[in-house]
Image: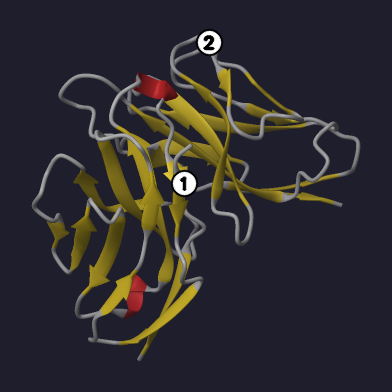
Amino acid sequence: DGGITQSPKYLFRKEGQNVTLSCEQNLNHDAMYWYRQDPGQGLRLIYYSQIVNDFQKGDIAEGYSVSREKKESFPLTVTSAQKNPTAFYLCASRTFGGSRDTGELFFGEGSRLTVL
Amino acid sequence: AQTVTQSQPEMSVQEAETVTLSCTYDTSESDYYLFWYKQPPSRQMILVIRQEAYKQQNATENRFSVNFQKAAKSFSLKISDSQLGDAAMYFCAYRRGYGGATNKLIFGTGTLLAVQP
């Protein structure tokens, strides 16, 4: 079945450590996104990528980094510069342009990061 | 800038009854999409229903329907015959109708729906 796989589901990190969240999709989607979810704040966009080797900052990119070396993969690194990294992180993807573009985002199951 | 507002942080409904979740948005665009997403306790976001702004007819998907009032910039979700499995966080979202991948989805803060047996 096609879908988006995020790993790990739960991750604990000590302060000062970088951590990388994995996101893999087999939907052949062009665009991929990372959102952060906090209680009472909805979803906020961290980074997004339209094509391989290209990505743009979202609304809250500070303290995060990404790469897009393959169409299927869009890992997110939470660096020690992120002041409040404890959150739920959602990866999403979509196609765009043409008859297949319904505007819909497809989501992974998320990763819960806790900083100790 | 576009914004999406969900003014009901929590709602409750009896099983088999009908509930309406509210959403308003602010935009100067004429071409856009609106969505309702459901996030159950498993945390995976699932699309419930989608509405294109150029369509006057309200979208429906089985027990889910919307009341799209373009002039009022209102996009409410009606759930009929509520079931225990409908209990979840519901997010309203907006997306401009052009611009490719830079065309990001803007989410409201969500409404937590409880379904009472």
Residue A86, position as x, y percentages in the image: 75, 49
The quarter of the displayed image where residue A102 is located? top left
Please state, as top left, top right, bottom left or bottom right, where the C terminus of chain B lies in the image. bottom left
- The residue lying toward the viewer, choosing from B91 and A71, is B91
Contact (Cβ within 8 Å) of mark 1 with mark 2: no
Figure check: A13 above or below A77 = below
**Callout in the foreground (1, 2):** 1
| Residue beneath the point at 22% across and 57% down | B69
Q: Disc number at residue B3?
A: 1
Residue B60, position as x, y percentages in the image: 14, 59
| Residue beneath the point at 47% across and 54% down | B108
| Residue beneath the point at 14% across and 54% down | B59
Q: Disc number at residue A54?
A: 2
Colour scheme employed for the rendering of this structure: secondary structure
The subunit letter for the residue under badge 1 reads B
Q: Is residue B95 left or right of residue B9?
A: left
